[in-house]
Amino acid sequence: MLTVRAGGVIDAGVVSEWVSESADNVGARRCGRVDPEAAYRPCMPSERRDFTVDLPRKRLAAGLLITDPDERVLLVEPAYEAQWEIPGGCVEADESPYQAAIREGREELGLDLSVGRLLVVDWVPARDGRTEGVMVIYDGGALDATAAERIVVPPGELKGWAWSDPPQTGQRLPPLLARRITQALHARADGCAYYLEDGVLVT
């Protein structure tokens, strides 16, 4: 393959020694800032840089909707704050949201769950103490009494867990998470996935 640059064509035999445009300038061109002097220049492989490392990033977390046969939701009580949550947590570097949900089920409940499909994606705006983020909830399935007896929570992280009916869920959870859980239950019943913003259904 021939690489075209200002002033002519680079011979195919030395294409590997050049790039038609530097990675830095690709990002600049896409933002409307082109440096004519740097648009075409020799660039060795060790100099090439992924411009996506400078793009904006969002906080990402994954949670599990787990219920009992009576459709009560499993909530956990953190040791570090007064409000309850669903099992879940931050997605780590180089970890998929789905794998994060599986890991959190193991770490917070001591269970190897067969995590199901995606139920909701919720974009949340920035607020005091937290940046904007994207929260996802997967279907953690239903646990019978025998499976629930095997739950073991990490003592330094969680005080305990409990099944919660809708009124209890509304009392124990902050409003944003309560809205998100309500929509996750609807998504499970409807057999689809919902997109939310700040816990409110968008599509």
Image: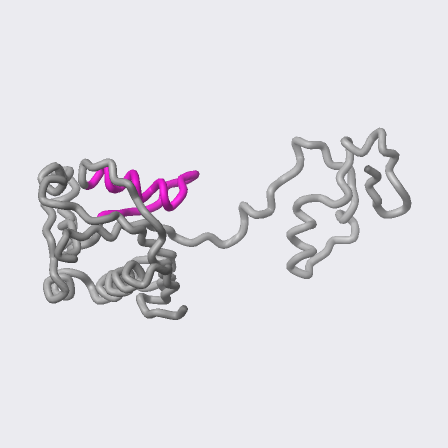
Image location (x, y in percent) of residue 2: 84, 39
Number of disc labels:
0
Judge whether residue 131 can be spotted in this image. Answer: yes
Q: Which of the 4 image quarters holds residue 129?
A: bottom left
Rendered-image quadrant of the N terminus: top right
Q: Residue furthest right?
A: 8
Rendered-image quadrant of the C terminus: bottom left
| Residue at the image position 25 percent from the left and 66 percent from the top | 179
Image location (x, y in percent) of residue 66: 21, 50
Q: Which of the 4 image quarters holds residue 14?
A: top right
Image location (x, y in percent) of residue 149: 9, 39
Measured along the vertical axis of the image, is residue 164 above or below residue 108? Answer: below
Q: Would you say residue 2 sits in the magenta stretch? A: no
- Report whether 111 appears left or right of 18: left
Measured along the vertical axis of the image, is residue 94 above or below residue 89? Answer: above
Judge whether residue 83 can be spotted in this image. Answer: no
The chosen color scheme is one colour
Measured along the vertical axis of the image, is residue 153 above or below residue 122? Answer: above
Image location (x, y in percent) of residue 91: 35, 45
| Residue at the image position 30 percent from the left and 44 percent from the top | 115
The span shown in magenta is 87-108
Q: Which of the 4 image quarters holds residue 131?
A: bottom left
